[in-house]
Image (cartoon, rainbow, N blue to C red):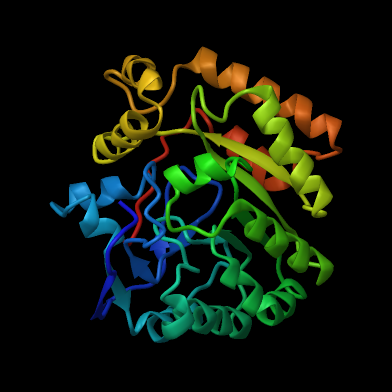
Amino acid sequence: MGSGDVRYREVTTKSALTRVQGMPFAWSLNPYRGCSHACTYCYARDYHARMGRDTGAGFDREIEVKINFADVLRTELRGLRLRELVALGTGTDPYQPCEGRYRLTRRSLEALVESPLPLTVITKGTLVVRDIDLYMKLSRVVDVRICVSIGSVDTAIARGAEPDAPPPRARLEAVRRMRAAGLHAGVLAAPILPDLTDSEASLDAVAAAARAHDASFFAIRPLKLDPGVKPHYFAYLEDRFPTLLPLAEARFTGRVNPERQYVDTLEARASRVQRKYGFVEDRYEKLRDAQREAPAQLRLAI
């Protein structure tokens, strides 16, 4: 994974906004299908599996570009009565490299500036800084939260697990630049990889880097391994950390999420480093925790 040419296929879509159930946001937006960052653990690979598509190269080397996405979104926004929270980038990175050419994310933000909705963005893409002007306009009228995903500041781990994503230091610089513009931007350490990036020292290193770059928040998410994702993550472990493969296989046998005890321990570590570096839980995190026991049926238009 993470090698070879990426092919882009232009398609049209009938809808842009997708209603979401059981999550802290009401709508999701995904202008692309697939993602060339080629992260071995990406949960969105499983959506390809459910559609009968290849979850390997079919996901990260064959990207669908929804060329009419922003126009459809603009029409849908005009018809909305409730101004509910929307999440951009839940099933694909809205700032993967092809955004530089297609500008679908920027055009979608322009539509949101015209018809504002509270917005959460999730990305590993440093191109997010290009759109600081639009985020500033939108944040004057609604809440805007920009989550830059950085699970580890270990460059070797990042290169192996996220082969075509920008390096952690570049993502941290993006956080710094957005914060300098007054935006609510921070670090989402996601996913945390068991036995690789889940130690308190590893979490501390990410939180320390987040604080050094003036992040508004630091939050974590544990690893989730759906059936369509598991082979790709296990192949990464077998190649880079073979001694960890049996542990991962045992941990995720018959399940997609780590056991509750493990998650509680991980969250306790994260809470300690959050307190150490002065990060307080924000509203988005409280909404997530309030819905932790609810069925998280995330229906994404990917």
- Which of the 4 image quarters holds residue 279? top right
Q: Quadrant of the C terminus?
A: bottom left
The answer to whether 180 appears left or right of 259 in the picture is: right
- Between residue 262 and residue 193, name the one nearer to us: 193
- Percent coordinates x, y for residue 98 in the rendering: 41, 76
Q: Residue at x 49, y 74 (%)?
A: 80
276 in relation to 86, above or below: above
Q: Is residue 101 visible?
A: yes
Q: Is residue 103 visible?
A: no
110 in relation to 238, above or below: below
The answer to whether 182 appears left or right of 229 in the picture is: right
- Percent coordinates x, y for residue 162 in the rendering: 45, 49
90 in relation to 283, above or below: below
The answer to whether 273 appears left or right of 174 in the picture is: right
Q: Residue at x 30, y 49 (%)?
A: 45
- Which of the 4 image quarters holds residue 5? bottom left
Number of numbered discs on residues = 0
Q: Residue at x 29, y 40 (%)?
A: 232
- Percent coordinates x, y for residue 176 in the rendering: 77, 61
- Which of the 4 image quarters holds residue 97? bottom left
- Percent coordinates x, y for residue 189 in the rendering: 60, 42
Q: Residue at x 71, y 43 (%)?
A: 218
Q: Residue furthest left?
A: 52
163 in relation to 70, above or below: above
